[in-house]
Image (tube, rainbow, N blue to C red):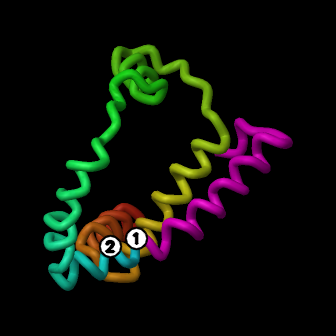
Amino acid sequence: MSAGLAGSEEASFYRHLYAAYSAALPILAEICDEVKSEREISSVVDSTARFEVDQMSKVDSALMWRTGETTRKGNIDVRVEPSTAGIYLGVMMAQIDVLQKNGHAWIRSATRRLSKQSIH
């Protein structure tokens, strides 16, 4: 990733990656605990009352949504924005670490596949 970034862009990428990882890890761990305990469904049901007061915003005209539409049409020449990439990857790495720590089946399956590939 950082091979395409230099100087302040690389610094921004890593600063955002580390900040996002640190912020996301405890949130994702809590979500995992809620799912394991089967309490998460109660939380979802309880939170629906908030939609009467705070409507969900529309995202279909947001820049990110329009960029995704363009990319899906085959025009994938989209500049990587270092802070956005760092945040995205930081959250994804935190999620992988939480899943791995909790022995999630996805992690075991991926590990088995990688082990088989390295043997051959």
Question: Within the image, what quadrant is residue 8 found in?
Answer: top right
Q: Which residue is mark 1?
A: 28
Query: In the rendering, at what x and y percent does residue 1 appear?
Result: 64, 45
**Residue 22 lies in magenta, yes or no?**
yes
Horizontal arrangement in the rendering, residue 44 relative to residue 24 (left or right): left
Identify whether 107 is placed above or below 14. below
Given residues 70 and 48, the one toward you in this image is 48
Question: Within the image, what quadrant is residue 4 found in?
Answer: top right
Q: CA distance from mark 1 to mark 2?
A: 5 Å
Q: What quarter of the picture does the C terminus occupy?
A: bottom left
Q: Main secondary structure of the magenta part?
A: helix
Query: In the rendering, at what x and y percent does residue 25 appear?
Result: 49, 72
Residue 16's tag is none
**Residue 71 lies in magenta, yes or no?**
no
The structure residue drawn at horizontal position 65% and vertical position 44%, both measured from the top left corner, is 83
Question: Within the image, what quadrant is residue 60 found in?
Answer: top left
The structure residue drawn at horizontal position 45% and vertical position 23%, both measured from the top left corner, is 67
Q: In the rendered structure, which amino acid carries the disc numbered 1? A: Leu
Q: In the rendered structure, which amino acid carries the disc numbered 2? A: Ile
Tell me if mark 1 has few (under 14), some (14-19) or many (20+) residues whose alpha carbon lies within 10 angstroms of its own.
Answer: some
- Magenta residue span: 1-27
Q: Secondary structure at mark 1?
A: helix
Whether label 1 touches label 2, CB < 8 Å: yes
Given residues 5 and 43, the one toward you in this image is 43
Query: In the rendering, at what x and y percent does residue 84 appear?
Result: 59, 42
Q: Which residue is mark 2?
A: 31
The structure residue drawn at horizontal position 57% and vertical position 51%, both measured from the top left corner, is 87
Identify whether 30 is placed above or below 2. below
